[in-house]
Each structure stands twice: as C-alpha cells, then as structure tokens.
Image (cartoon, rainbow, N blue to C red):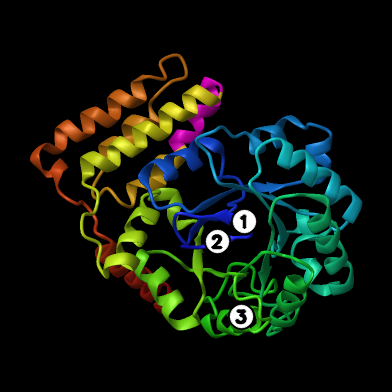
C-alpha cells in the first residue's frame, strides 16, 4: 500500500482538508466507515496555531483514534511555518502538508495557498526549511498553475521532491478556475510523470478533483497513473465512499453497499461524536446542515429532513429519535440500498446535463 516517508498507510485513499468541514467528528466518522488511508485537518493558519486561537485549536483537535493524521498549514514565511509545524507535530500530526493550492482571497492575499505557485524560489525555501525543522514527512498540495491555462506544477513538483517533500497531491485545476470547469486528468498525468521521473520512486503523487463516486477514483488512477486519490466534498454526504472505493480498487466491484439502515447508523454516530466534542448548540446547528448532504444518498427522506430541522437545543437527543423514526417508517426497505453509487453517477450526469441545457 501507499507509503509517505516512513508512514505506512492502509490504503491509497486520502480525505482532503475540506475547509469548514474536516473537523474531528467528521474524520472519525469517515475512519469508522473504513478505507481512509490518511485524513487531513482543515487548513491551519500558523498565526492561529501559535496564538492558540480558539477556532484553530478546534480545527487541530485530535485523539488516538484519529491516526494517521495530516495537518495542513498555509503561509509563505519559512520561520513562522517551521514554528507552527513543530507545534503541530507535538500535538499529533503524523504528516505536515503545505497548502499551495487554495484559491480563496483569505489565503492568497497573504501570498500563501495558490499564490505560492507564482513565487517558486520562496516556495522552495519554505519547503526546505520545514523539511529540516520537523521529524515527520512534509507533503505539498498544488494546483496545475495559477493563471488561465498555466501548467507550472510539473516543474515545481519535481523541485519540491528534490527539497525533500515526501508526497505531492495535485488538484486538476488552475487557481484561475477555482472550482469551476472540469478536472484536467491530462494535467494531473503530467505532474505524476514529473514526480516519478525524479528517480525517487518511493515518492507518491496523489490525484485530486471531481472524485464524486468510487468510479471516478478508479478512472483517475487508470488515466493518470497517480498512486492514490484524495477525496473531498463527495465524502461529506457519504463518508463510506472510502470503504466502497477500496472495494472497487481491490476487487473490481463494489460488493456490499451500505443499506439505508446502515447509512442512518453512520449519521447517528456522526452526531454522537459532535455532541461529545462540541457544545450542544453548535452540534445541533451543524447537524441540521450536514443532514442535507447525507440526504442525497438516502432516497426520499423529506420526513427526516423536516424532523431534524425541528430539533431544539433543549432536547438534542431528539435528533437521534428522528433518525430512528425515519428508519421505522421506511419499513423493510430500510435493509435495501437506497441509492447505489451507479445510480448516484447517473444522477450527477443528469444534473450536469440539465445545467448545460439551462
């Protein structure tokens, strides 16, 4: 299986550092479903880490069941990144990732994230310093380039490997595209080839972008030759995507998709972790948002969404009852697969087609 530096992973499937979503309850939920080789925190601000900012401390929260764990840092100041990196390692980071792909203004206005693609000399200096500062593998997540049509990632990825970076993840879009358009598999393939051509055969290159079903993950590996895939937003409504993707990659098929009852069990487990780790008001509010993502994989579930919407802070356990009542109402169909991955693929294709027509 995949190895990042001295860290051996159980699978070649990585949970992305999804901004605003990748907290400890969610990571534990995905891990419990199975198939996660390495999970990442939300992207972390070095200033927030060193000042022990409350929000940053929450984003960094971890426990012994949350391993192996990558913590992703963004910043262009080498000294600050090193100091924050050492702090993160002391608090449970198995690997450290440098964000070189985030296109949002909050990050790029500090000349971090995808702006690091525009300053390769400083970017390499940051990577070189961080590699020397910590005793865990340092990785990097890039985009294909910064401007429209740019493809600067192959040369930068090659240089990062020369500086000691132990894994490259490449998102198949430019920063200019943000999250629009389609993932460029040919661009990813060129970065994979550049990493493999360094002669450091043990350095993996991970593909990222538009992984919406297990079939997308297999297609990316087949087309680009990448060593693994990083899955982002598709996991939010179906954290079992790692489990099912592992089955597909290992056997050529998804042999036992979760039933409606089992999927509702995942929702309940997710909520219990949130109640345990967050204050009640935040847990209830967050779950009201999260259930809409899960709903895409549950079939008709209007009563569930409405019931969750009506849960009040004074009676947080009521949400668990709402899920149980929904399962009971469904009856024997609760032991069927409500929306298979193949059906989900058809839904997404139909939605994309409708959008194109509109």
> Disc 3 vs disc 2: Cβ atoms closer than 8 Å?
no
* Above or below for 101 versus 6: below
N-term-proximal mark, 3 vs 2: 2
> Element under label 3?
helix
The overriding secondary structure of the stretch rendered in magenta is helix
- Number of marks in the image? 3
> Disc 1 vs disc 2: Cβ atoms closer than 8 Å?
yes
Q: Gap between marks 1 and 2, in whole Å?
A: 7 Å
What span is in magenta?
279-288
* Above or below for 252 versus 15: below
N-term-proximal mark, 3 vs 1: 1
**Residue 145 shows which numbered tag?**
none
Q: Nearer the viewer, residue 185 or 205?
A: 205
> Element under label 2?
strand
Residue marked by disc 1: 6
Q: Position of 86 compared to 323: left or right?
A: right
Q: How crowded is mark 1: few (under 14 residues within 10 Å), some or many (20 or more)?
A: few
Quadrant of the image occupied by residue 249:
bottom left
Q: Gap between marks 3 and 1, in whole Å?
A: 18 Å
Residue marked by disc 2: 3
**Residue 196 shows which numbered tag?**
3
Residue at horizontal 37%, vertical 73%?
Answer: 354
Query: Which residue is situated farthest in the left direction here?
Result: 332
> Disc 3 vs disc 1: Cβ atoms closer than 8 Å?
no
């Amino acid at each position: 299986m995949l190895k990042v530096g001295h860290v051996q992973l159980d699978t070649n499937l990585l949970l992305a550092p999804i901004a605003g979503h990748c907290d400890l309850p969610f990571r534990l939920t995905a891990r419990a479903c199975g198939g996660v080789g390495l999970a990442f925190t939300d992207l972390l601000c070095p200033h927030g880490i060193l000042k022990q900012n409350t929000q940053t401390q929450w984003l960094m929260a971890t426990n012994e069941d949350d391993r192996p764990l990558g913590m992703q840092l963004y910043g262009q100041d080498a000294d600050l990144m090193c100091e924050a990196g050492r702090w993160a390692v002391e608090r449970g980071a198995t690997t450290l990732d440098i964000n070189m792909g985030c296109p949002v203004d909050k990050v790029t206005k500090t000349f971090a994230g995808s702006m690091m693609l525009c300053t390769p000399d400083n970017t390499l200096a940051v990577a070189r310093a961080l590699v020397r500062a910590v005793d865990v593998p340092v990785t990097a997540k890039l985009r294909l380039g910064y401007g429209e049509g740019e493809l600067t990632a192959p040369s930068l990825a090659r240089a990062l490997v020369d500086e000691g970076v132990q894994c490259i993840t490449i998102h198949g879009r430019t920063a200019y595209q943000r999250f629009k358009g389609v993932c460029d598999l040919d661009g990813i393939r060129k970065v994979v080839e550049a990493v493999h051509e360094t002669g450091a055969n043990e350095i993996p290159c991970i593909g990222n972008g538009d992984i919406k079903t297990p079939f997308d993950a297999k297609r990316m590996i087949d087309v680009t030759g990448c060593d693994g895939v990083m899955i982002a937003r598709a996991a939010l409504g179906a954290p079992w995507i790692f489990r099912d993707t592992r089955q597909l990659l290992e056997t050529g098929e998804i042999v036992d998709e979760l039933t409606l009852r089992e999927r509702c069990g995942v929702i309940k487990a997710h909520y219990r972790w949130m109640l345990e780790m967050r204050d009640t008001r935040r847990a209830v509010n967050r779950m009201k948002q999260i259930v809409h993502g899960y709903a895409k994989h549950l079939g008709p579930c209007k009563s569930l969404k409405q019931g969750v919407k009506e849960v009040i802070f004074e009676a947080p356990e009521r949400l668990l009852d709402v899920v149980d009542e929904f399962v009971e109402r469904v009856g024997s169909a609760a032991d069927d697969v409500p929306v298979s991955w193949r059906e989900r693929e058809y839904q997404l294709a139909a939605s994309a087609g409708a959008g194109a027509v509109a």
